[in-house]
Image (cartoon, helix red, strand yellow):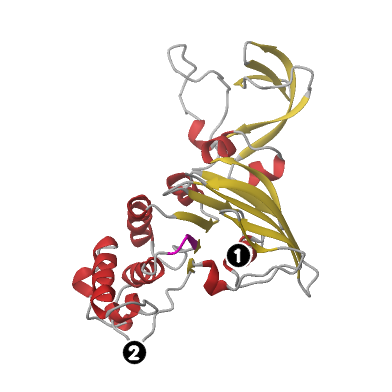
């Protein structure tokens, strides 16, 4: 059963910057909501407000029918929200072993704590490292320890703020792959902050795009990436070519576009036939290079061009 997350926050800073984000989504068991956007878009501010680490100036935050903040003065302290939080850096206690870090903050009997620690070490695949201290770990290993520590108290919601940012490419790829499996096995709802489209596509179920402190689009990941709502979203999600075009005709979901004298055909079943000015979005992975035009290829549009750089 999905848990509703409602976020309507406004936060003003002394610099004059304003984050004013509004979105609502349902987070089912093992679901990942991705907050996506460039640096400075307001992503971290939003998740820190969700976790209770920042207090918005106005608005409301509701999770699973429980109001954590609103304009009436309602405020639930971070420790009472039961939100697990993992940032860019693992922030492990240097004087504690891996086992000690994972068990930090656990309550209950010694037997129950040890059982839970063992479960978490196995879950994130760091069991053999349990006696090491943080300085003896690689970056990827340390981040796995921090993930285990965040999951150990069985939080209601897990917030991950750029958890791969400090990792090298191989460690990032391995942890990204494992994280999807871990989240599903635990069955926890996750809010993930990232500016990397590979993270968003590989991990996300729902996507909220932030730019300039505001939500520009929200929806299923593939839908947002394939059909950006406006020019800002298209550039934010990494569409390499965004070209002004005019609709020259629509026939059964096939749209004929005039692009500076050239003709392109695109598929869009929901296009407004009365609309004229649009943007044609072309992704690099959708482009096929051939030495000569051929009728037996899947590409619908054939354009002559010249390679100027590789």
Residue 157 in magenta? Answer: yes
Q: Is residue 212 visible?
A: no
Q: As drawn, is 210 to the left or to the right of 145?
A: right
Q: Secondary structure at mark 1?
A: helix
Q: Is residue 71 above or below residue 208?
A: below
Q: As drawn, is 101 to the left or to the right of 289?
A: left
Name the residue rendered at 33%, 59% in the picture.
Answer: 170
Say few, some or many: other residues with alpha carbon within 10 Å of mark 2 (under 14 / 14 to 19 / 20 or more).
Answer: few
Q: Residue at label 2?
A: 95
* x and y, in percent, of residue 37 in the image: 61, 54
Q: Earlier in the sequence, mark 1 or mark 2?
A: 1
Residue 78 in magenta? Answer: no
Q: As drawn, is 225 to the left or to the right of 292?
A: right
Q: Is residue 127 above or below residue 305?
A: below
Q: Are marks 1 and 2 in contact (CB under 8 Å)?
A: no
Corner quadrant of residue 228: top right
* x and y, in percent, of residue 230 in the image: 71, 39
Q: In the depicted view, which residue is nearer to us: 98 or 256?
A: 98
- Range shown magenta: 155-159
Say few, some or many: other residues with alpha carbon within 10 Å of mark 1 (under 14 / 14 to 19 / 20 or more).
Answer: many
Farthest residue, direction left: 128
Q: Is residue 235 above or below residue 111?
A: above
Q: Residue at label 1?
A: 44
Q: Is residue 234 above or below residue 166?
A: above
Name the residue rendered at 41%, 69% in the picture.
Answer: 150
Q: Is residue 281 visible?
A: yes
Q: In the depicted view, which residue is nearer to us: 71 or 174?
A: 71
Name the residue rendered at 44%, 17% in the picture.
Answer: 297
* x and y, in percent, of residue 288 in the image: 47, 28
* x and y, in percent, of residue 260 in the image: 74, 25
| Gap between marks 1 and 2 measured at Cα | 28 Å
Characterize the magenta stretch by its predominant secondary structure: strand
């Amino acid at each position: 059963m999905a848990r509703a997350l409602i976020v309507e926050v406004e936060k003003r800073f002394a610099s004059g910057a304003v984050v004013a984000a509004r979105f609502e989504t349902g987070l089912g068991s093992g679901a990942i909501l991705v907050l996506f956007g460039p640096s400075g878009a307001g992503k971290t501010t939003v998740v820190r407000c969700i976790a209770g680490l920042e207090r918005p100036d106005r608005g409301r935050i509701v999770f699973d029918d429980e109001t954590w903040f609103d304009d009436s003065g309602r405020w639930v302290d971070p420790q009472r929200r039961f939100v697990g939080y993992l940032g860019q850096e693992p922030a492990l206690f240097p004087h504690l072993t891996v086992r000690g870090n994972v068990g930090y903050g656990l309550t209950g009997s010694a037997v129950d704590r040890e059982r839970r620690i063992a479960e978490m070490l196995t879950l994130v695949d760091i069991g053999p490292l349990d006696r090491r201290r943080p300085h003896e770990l690689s970056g990827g290993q340390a981040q796995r320890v921090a993930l285990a520590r965040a999951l150990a108290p069985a939080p209601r919601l897990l917030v991950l703020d750029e958890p791969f940012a400090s990792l090298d490419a191989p460690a990032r790829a391995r942890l990204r792959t494992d994280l999807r499996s871990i989240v599903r096995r635990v069955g926890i709802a996750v809010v993930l902050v990232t500016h990397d489209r590979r993270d968003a596509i590989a991990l996300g179920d729902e996507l909220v795009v932030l730019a300039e402190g505001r939500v520009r689009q929200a929806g299923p990941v593939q839908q947002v990436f394939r059909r950006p709502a406006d020019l800002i979203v298209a550039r934010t999600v990494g569409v390499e070519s965004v070209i002004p075009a005019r609709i020259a005709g629509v026939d059964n979901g096939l749209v004929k576009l005039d692009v500076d004298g050239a003709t392109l055909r695109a598929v869009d079943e929901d296009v407004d036939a009365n609309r004229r000015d649009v943007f044609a979005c072309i992704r690099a992975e959708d482009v096929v290079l051939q030495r000569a035009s051929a009728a037996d290829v899947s590409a619908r549009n054939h354009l002559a061009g010249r390679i100027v750089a590789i």
